[in-house]
């Protein structure tokens, strides 16, 4: 499993990575590089450092090949995008999947079963999972598989979904700021309009940006951000509460 930048260094991302690790334990055999892992390079490329990106890709491919890696499960859609679309052009022959696609597979194989979780949820499509890679259904199928959970869609979804504001390196630079017209705050208001209690995400960047947006909008007692892995873990039979 490729943990990535946010899952390694951001406090919110670390919690999500830990939840996914615990969730997958017992169902699939996965390993992680730990302190030997380096960045995938997606944001490096987005910020214009094309030369450094090439170096990172070359180092990652060399490392994966040396370890005999054939399948990579990513936490972040940003890493998913880079490894799925850019690495093959440079000789990286790996099967790359996002963790929600793996959870969907486990549900289809009846490996995961759920207890009732009565809540209302709206789902935010991450840009790099959705518009860039056209994966809209796996996260929704997971949510719809949980008994008692009501999925309420926002007015802008799938290819029309609004960005959280963290893409293109803005998660690290905050060039766009956090005023009322920032992408994260606009998206939070769209989520609040649905009257859902939970704003579900499938990306650690989105989790952080939208949680900040909720605080800026003063909606902490009305809307809560949860990663899909966290929602699954709450409802999974025998799961960590």
Image (tube, rainbow, N blue to C red):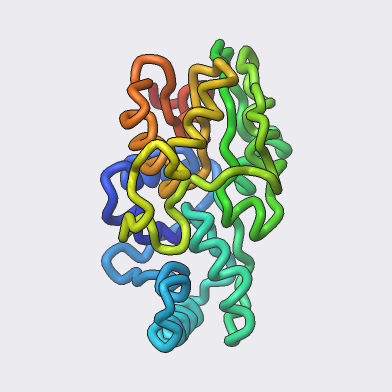
Residue depicted at x 30% and y 71%: 36
29 w.r.t. 46: above or below: above
187 w.r.t. 4: above or below: above
Residue 215, image x and y in percent? Answer: 32, 29
Q: Quadrant of residue 172?
A: bottom left
Residue depicted at x 45% and y 84%: 50
The answer to whether residue 105 of the structure is visible from this angle is no
Q: Quadrant of residue 214?
A: top left
The quarter of the picture where the C terminus appears is top left
Q: Is residue 206 left or right of residue 156?
A: left
Residue 87, image x and y in percent? Answer: 57, 78
Q: Is residue 221 left or right of residue 143?
A: left
Front-lying residue, 207 or 95:
207
Q: Quadrant of residue 180?
A: top left
194 w.r.t. 81: above or below: above
The answer to whether residue 113 of the structure is visible from this angle is yes
Residue depicted at x 44% and y 40%: 181
Front-lying residue, 125 or 88:
125
37 w.r.t. 156: above or below: below
Residue depicted at x 43% and y 52%: 166
Q: Is residue 213 left or right of residue 24?
A: left
Q: Is residue 209 left or right of residue 82?
A: left
Front-lying residue, 180 or 116:
180
Residue 126, image x and y in percent? Answer: 56, 48
Across the whole image, how many numbered discs are drawn on residues? 0
């Amino acid at each position: 499993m490729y943990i990535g930048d946010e899952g390694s260094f951001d406090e919110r991302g670390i919690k999500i990575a830990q939840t996914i690790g615990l969730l997958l334990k017992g169902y699939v055999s996965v390993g992680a590089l730990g302190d030997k892992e380096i960045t995938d390079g997606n944001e490096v490329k987005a910020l214009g450092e094309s030369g450094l990106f090439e170096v990172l890709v070359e180092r990652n491919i060399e490392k994966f090949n040396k370890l005999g890696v054939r399948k990579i499960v990513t936490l972040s859609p940003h890493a998913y995008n880079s490894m799925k679309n850019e690495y093959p052009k440079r000789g990286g022959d790996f099967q790359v999947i996002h963790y929600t696609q793996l959870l969907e597979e486990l549900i289809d194989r009846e490996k995961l079963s759920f207890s009732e979780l009565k809540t209302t949820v709206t789902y935010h499509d991450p840009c790099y999972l959705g518009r860039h890679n056209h994966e809209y259904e796996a996260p929704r199928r997971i949510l719809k598989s949980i008994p008692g959970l009501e999925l309420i869609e926002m007015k802008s979804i799938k290819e029309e979904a609004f960005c959280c504001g963290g893409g293109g390196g803005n998660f690290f630079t905050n060039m766009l700021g956090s005023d009322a017209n920032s992408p994260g705050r606009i998206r939070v208001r769209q989520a609040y309009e649905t009257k859902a209690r939970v704003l579900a995400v499938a990306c650690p960047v989105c989790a952080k940006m939208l949680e900040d947006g909720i605080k800026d909008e003063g909606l902490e007692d009305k809307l809560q951000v949860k990663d899909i892995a966290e929602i699954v873990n709450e409802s999974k039979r025998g799961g960590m509460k």
